[in-house]
Image (cartoon, rainbow, N blue to C red):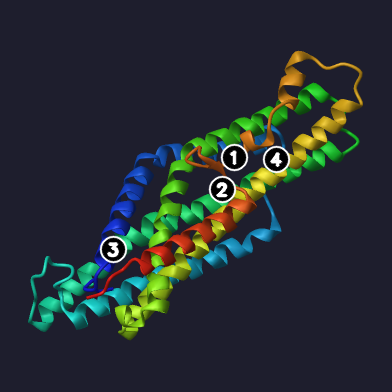
Amino acid sequence: MTMTRPAVPIAWASMTAITLIHRYALSSRVQKLRRISLSLENISLKLKLGLKNENNKWIYLWAIFSSTLFLIFAVASSITVYINGTRAVLFNFPLEEKCSKATAAAFYGLTLIIYFMLPLNTFGIYYTITCHRMKCIMDNFKKVLESIQCLEFDKTLQMYKDIQNLISEMDDGMSFLMFTSTVFNAIPMYFGVTKLLRPMDFAMDSETISVWSLFIASYGAFISMAATGSLVCETNTKILDQLKGMANSRSALMPFQNDMLSLDAKKGSLTIWNIVPVTRGFIFSILGTIFTYCILLDGMRKDT
């Protein structure tokens, strides 16, 4: 996308800054994210709770679709840079020779893939798969609670405590990255609103393709991440309610048992940088908030 119109360069610079922060945060948390994956495997073996679920094919289909859209975004942006020149990406310095323009455009597209597609798309896929695997573990734990063989209440509570600890470990490693991913999505929304309200800001076909491919890819990732994250919270709430129901049938509870059952289910949910839990309501509220502010910002523009 060429950023030659007012306000659009600021949005592009903001998106670049957020992406760099996200990339740095992701690279600094690689080992922690790897430990989370290992912890999921270990707890499934320790508690004899399976990870397999037949309803996960959509994740891999979405991952392929999302990756394809990011590639289309990079290619379309490179074409735009080649056609319109390189002033917007080379500090107002133009390149006249076709070979130089093609080289700069190719380098620009490669940069978008490395700094946009890989960090954002990779984390989006990782987050979605990790939350889905966590939900599978919790679903299988619910089946254990529903079975007749589940008679040892202390052992059951200890299993639940291990699951809660794993959710806390996941949130510690992924909450800030979920925050940067959420903030990033405000920019594609702004580009989309601008394209609808001010079509001449992105008049070229390649610009239109880059705007909508980035919009669909980023919001597809956000909705997938938030949806699977909210399922972790909802399943945790159902498990806690089920445990409280089992506790009501017992005559007396130990202090440890009372402490476990008095927990708020939201404390065992994933969050956005420890600010708000990832719930189903959060998805709609954040989309509506971002869209409203994009409309307001566009209305404040004074084109000369």
Q: Quadrant of residue 121?
A: bottom left
The answer to whether the residues at label 2 and label 1 have Cβ atoms under 8 Å apart is: yes
Image: 91 above or below 286: below
SS of the residue under disc 2: helix
Observer-side mark, 2 or 1, equals 2
Q: Which residue is mark 4?
A: 236
Crowd around label 4: few <14 · some 14–19 · many ≥20 (10 Å):
many
- In which quadrant will I find the C terminus? bottom left
Left or right side of 74 for 5: left
Query: What mark, if any, has residue 122 been given in the picture?
Result: none
Gap in Å between the C-alphas at discs 2 and 1? 8 Å
The answer to whether the residues at label 3 and label 2 have Cβ atoms under 8 Å apart is: no
Q: Is residue 50 visible?
A: no
| Residue shown at the point (66%, 38%) measured from the top left | 44
Gap in Å between the C-alphas at discs 1 and 3? 38 Å
Amino acid type at mark 4: Asn
Gap in Å between the C-alphas at discs 3 and 2? 30 Å
67 or 247: nearer the viewer: 247
Q: Which residue is mark 2?
A: 130
Amino acid type at mark 3: Trp
Query: What mark, if any, has residue 12 been given in the picture?
Result: 3
Q: Which residue is mark 1?
A: 40
Q: Earlier in the sequence, mark 3 or mark 4?
A: 3
The x, y position of residue 94, in whole percent, is: 9, 75
Crowd around label 3: few <14 · some 14–19 · many ≥20 (10 Å):
some
- In which quadrant will I find the N terminus? bottom left
